[in-house]
Amino acid sequence: MNAPASPLPLDAPASLAAIETLETRVAEARAEIGRVIFGQTRVIDESLITLLAGGHTLLIGLPGLAKTRLVQTLGTVLGLDDKRVQFTPDLMPADILGSEVLEESPGGTRDFRFIRGPVFCQLLMADEINRASPRTQSALLQAMQEHRVDIAGISHPLPAPFHVLATQNPLEQEGTYPLPEAQLDRFLMQIDVGYPDRDAERRMLIATTGAEQDRPAKVMSADELVAAQRLVRRVPVGEAVVEAILTLVRSGRPEESPLDLVRRAVAWGPGPRAAQALMLAVRARALIEGRLSPSIDDIVALAGPVLRHRMALGFAARADGVTIAEVIDALLETIA
């Protein structure tokens, strides 16, 4: 991640006006998304936080929980150019990035022309990303980290903003290729998508089986999202919150953790990118709620989505029934 800009002074009128404006715009976006995505308020909020923080999201959930519809709705509401790629075992890197083709001009000269792949968009949905081969999965690594791709020695910048929202099915693992740690670390958050409650499912049942369905409307533009991402990086963070983030992340590493559970159960813990991700995420959460700086409560709310895919349990711990959620809960007690 790039280094954050210098914090904006709390008493700067421009910052207060910008925060109030963004709070209003995000509230409108949340409401618009909620009109077509039922019973997933937490998922919507965490997805918006990820985008405001400039990151990528890994959505984990069973089929039929509106993961694809959520990505499409985000693209429409935020005014982003979105594309979808269905990941399959036979998908090749060129199917995502693009390739060079040899063309002959009317004058008889031959030249290579680069044909851009679907990665050249602002919001890429990588559907069932773990069904593609490791070679194809790795094709996204440079794009996700550097926002550019290199083809035949030539660098091609991606549009701004650029976000990847990938999905996985947590049950069907046959014929899949688990994402390597290096790629998991590129996702700012792992968002677990659960079932909606009864009332939300009832509203969804009525709204989606009639003659007409609600269509989301555009609320923001890509330029507004980029401006919001810049503003997030200027939100000041108190020393107590910085220390809490450092304590939380470093306590998750078995080599230096003060917790016996972590030393006994965790095979590898979160790296520095986890602290960077959590810092940006808590800033974004505070900003969309109209607060001038994040608090410990923001860390507690976002520790799970930021850390759960950046830690792994040892074999013995898994056999004993220890879960990553239990470990994160124990880590949160160190900053309570």
Image (cartoon, grey):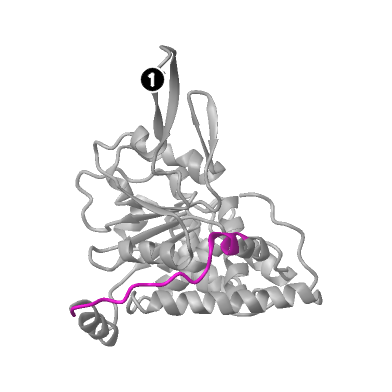
**Which residue is depicted at the point 49% across and 68% down?**
48
Left or right position of 189 against 251:
left
In the image, farthest residue toward the top: 108
Q: Residues within 10 Å of mark 1 (few under 14, many from 20)?
A: few
Q: Nearer the viewer, residue 135 or 152?
A: 152
Q: Name the element at disc 1.
A: strand
Can you see residue 56?
A: yes
Instruction: Quadrant for residue 59, please give it.
Output: bottom left
**Which residue is depicted at the point 38% across and 72% down?**
216
Q: Which residue is mark 1?
A: 102
Left or right position of 231 against 65:
right
Instruction: Quadrant for residue 64, please give it.
Output: bottom left
Q: Nearer the viewer, residue 326 or 271?
A: 271
Q: Which region is colored magenta? A: 210-226
Left or right position of 236 against 129:
right
**Which residue is depicted at the point 38% across and 20% down?**
102
Q: Main secondary structure of the magenta part?
A: loop
Give percent across and percent down for residue 104: 39, 17
Q: Which three-letter amino acid code belongs to the residue tagged 1?
A: Leu
**Which residue is depicted at the point 44% across and 21% down?**
112
Give percent across and percent down for residue 240: 71, 71
Quarter placement of the C terminus: bottom right
